[in-house]
Image (cartoon, helix red, strand yellow):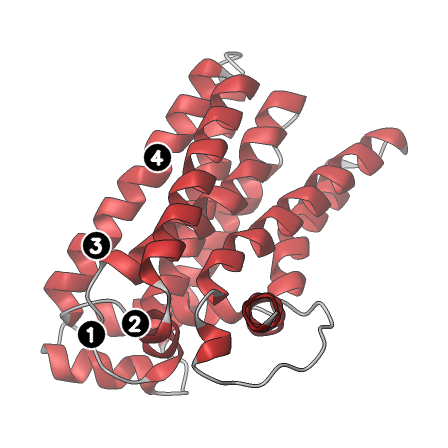
Amino acid sequence: MKKIKSIGSSFAIAFSMYSKIPMPQAEWSEENRKYVICFFPLVGAVAGALCYAWYRLCGGINAGAFFYTAGMAAIPLFLTGGIHVDGFMDTMDALHSYRDREEKLRILKDSHIGAFAVICLLGYYLTYLGSISELKSDRAVLCFCLGFLLSRTLSGLSLVYFPAAKKEGLLYAFSSTAHKRCVRLVLLFLLAVCLLALLFVSPVGGALAAAGNLAVFLWYRHMSQKEFGGITGDLAGCFLLCAEWMSAVIPAGLCLLQVL
C-alpha cells in the first residue's frame, strides 16, 4: 500500500512540475520522488494527443494554415507553462557567452534575458512554425506528435545515465532520489514502444524522425559534458526544445519531398 501511494505521489509530482494540469498536492519527500522520472514522458504523451486532436479539429472545420500552425505550437507551450523554453533561452545565453565553465553555469541561473536568448528563440520558432505548417498528412502529424513522448523519454534516460553538473536544483533532486533500476526499465520500455510506433506509422519517416532525436540526444550529452561538466535542468529543457524542433523539421521535409 505504501509503495502504491508513493507511485501515485510520483505521478502527481511529475505532472504538477512539468505541466499545468491540476494535480492533488503530494508531499515533496525522497520516497515520493523515486518514480517521478517514470511519469515525465506521459506529459509528452498528453501533449502529443492534444496536438493530434487539434490537427483533426482543424481538418474538420477547414481551418486556415496559420490557425492550425499556431495552435500546434501553442498547445505544448501552454501545457508545460514554458518551463523548457526558459531552459532553452538560458542555455543559449550561456553558450554564446563563450566564457569559462563556472561563468556559464552562473549564466544558467541568471533570471535576466540576454540578446542571444531572444535571437535564438526567434530563429527557433520561425523555423518551427514553418515546419509545422507543412505537416499536412496523418503520418507526418503522428510522427510529430510521437516526438513529444520520445523526447521526454530520452530526457528521462539522461537523468539516470548522464552526470549532473552540480549537486543542487530540481534535476539533481529527481535524479539523486530516483529508483534508478525501475526508472531505467520503464523508460527503456517506453523508448522501445515509441520507436516501434514511429516505424509503424511510417518506416521511412519514423526511422528518420527517431534518428534525428537520437542525434540531438548525442549532441546534448557531448555539449553538456564539454561546456558545463554535466547536465542541468536548463540544459534538459534546451534538449527537449531541440528534439521537438527535429520532430517537426524532418516530417515537414519529407512532406515537401512527397515522401511522407
Amino acid type of the residue tagged 4 in the rendering: Gly
Q: Which residue is mark 4?
A: 212
Q: CA distance from mark 2 to mark 1?
A: 6 Å
Q: Are marks 2 and 1 in contact (CB under 8 Å)?
A: yes
53 on left or right of 18: right
> Residue placed at 25% from the left, 54% from the top?
220
Is 126 drawn above or below residue 146 in the view shown? below
- Asked whether the viewer can see residue 137, the reply is no
Q: Marks 2 and 4: which is nearer the front?
A: 2
Front residue of this view, candidates 2 and 117 = 2
Instruction: Name the residue tied to disc 2.
Output: 232
Amino acid, disc 2: Thr
Q: Amino acid at mark 3?
A: Arg
- Please give the residue where the numbered disc 1 appears in the rendered image: 165
Q: Position of residue 249 (x, y in %)?
A: 46, 35
Give the mark nearer the N terminus: 2 vs 3: 3
Tell which circle, 4 or 3, labels the residue nearer the N-terminal end. 4
Residue drawn at the location 62% of the way across and 73% of the way down: 16
Rounded to the nearest whole Å, what is the CA distance between mark 4 and mark 1?
25 Å
Amino acid bearing label 1: Ala
In the rendered structure, find residue 129 and report the number of the disc placed on it.
Answer: none
Q: Which residue is tagged 3?
A: 221
